[in-house]
Amino acid sequence: MKHIPVMKKQSVNALDIFPNGKYIDATFGFGGHSTEILSKLGENGCLFAIDKDLDAIKDIDQNILEDERFTLKHGCFSSLDSFTQEWGIHGSVNGILFDLGVSSYHFDNPKRGFSFNGDGLIDMRFDQTQGEAAFNWINNASESDLANVIWKYGEEKFSKRIAKEIIKERDKNKIMSTIELANLIEKTIPRTKYKKHKATKTFQAIRIFTNNELEILKEALLKSYSILAPKGRLVLITYHSLEDKVIKNFIKHT
């Protein structure tokens, strides 16, 4: 899988890499950032990477995998503290990189259920080995829970109307496919001047809720202090205001 990460050069440069330093790529993806970090490390430097998605790990470039300076683990970055203790680098890490959100791979693969650009089962889990697929929650949550999630994580002003229509539709048939859900939302929301698809905010909300993204981010940020060495760097790439708010609050209160 070929994936070119956003702001690869800028984010890796922000780590200010020491050739013999210890670094963590907390969101390995398909290795774009890791490859760049390794290119800047010397013989005694080391890079540890984590990813929730087994698809990314299974598709790893053999050149990275065979690099003795590199270690990759399947898991969530909320467990960074236990991973760094296991690796023997807790408190001595020179930099951690987080590339938050969804990759183009997730949007482009309809089988993962993240996007309405192709039809697929509404799964939306980054880690398909655990947790509840989004379609289970959509078909079992109360109307108030649906509306609250769509508003809280999608900032969708028609959240109550969408929740009501989801309940009506699932009383007839379970809502299982991305296109089915997107069409329902398309018919529910009045015509707007926005260029984005009407289902964009709702899909974002369900994805964030399904993966508990904001709470996991908060947890990882708090743990980063004890993981980093003195003057160690924390670099984060974010894509929406909810992530921005979590990070700004962390900076403000620490």
Image: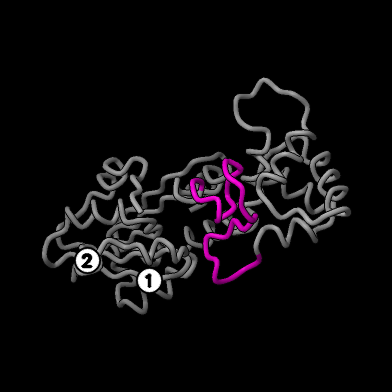
Magenta range is 107-132
> Would residue 219 appear left or right of 57 to someone viewing this image?
right
Quadrant for residue 118, please give it.
Answer: top right
Q: Dot 1, crowdedness within 10 Å: few (<14), some or many (≥20)?
A: some
Q: CA distance from mark 2 to mark 1?
A: 14 Å
Q: Residue at x 81, y 47 (%)?
A: 166
Q: Is residue 142 above or below residue 194?
A: below
What amino acid is at disc 2? Cys
> Would residue 67 appear left or right of 24 to someone viewing this image?
left
Q: Helix, strand or loop at disc 2?
A: strand
Residue occupied by mark 2: 46
Q: Helix, strand or loop at disc 1?
A: strand
Q: Residue at x 72, y 45 (%)?
A: 181
Residue nearer the viewer, 213 or 59: 59
What amino acid is at disc 1? Lys
Q: Magenta stretch mostly in which secondary structure? A: loop
Mark 2 touches mark 1? (CB < 8 Å):
no
- x, y (%) of residue 165? 84, 43
Residue nearer the viewer, 155 or 119: 119
- x, y (%) of residue 26? 39, 60
Quadrant for residue 97, please give it.
Answer: bottom left
- x, y (%) of residue 105? 45, 50
Residue 77: within the magenta?
no
Residue 122: within the magenta?
yes
Q: Is residue 94 above or below residue 8?
A: below
Residue occupied by mark 1: 73
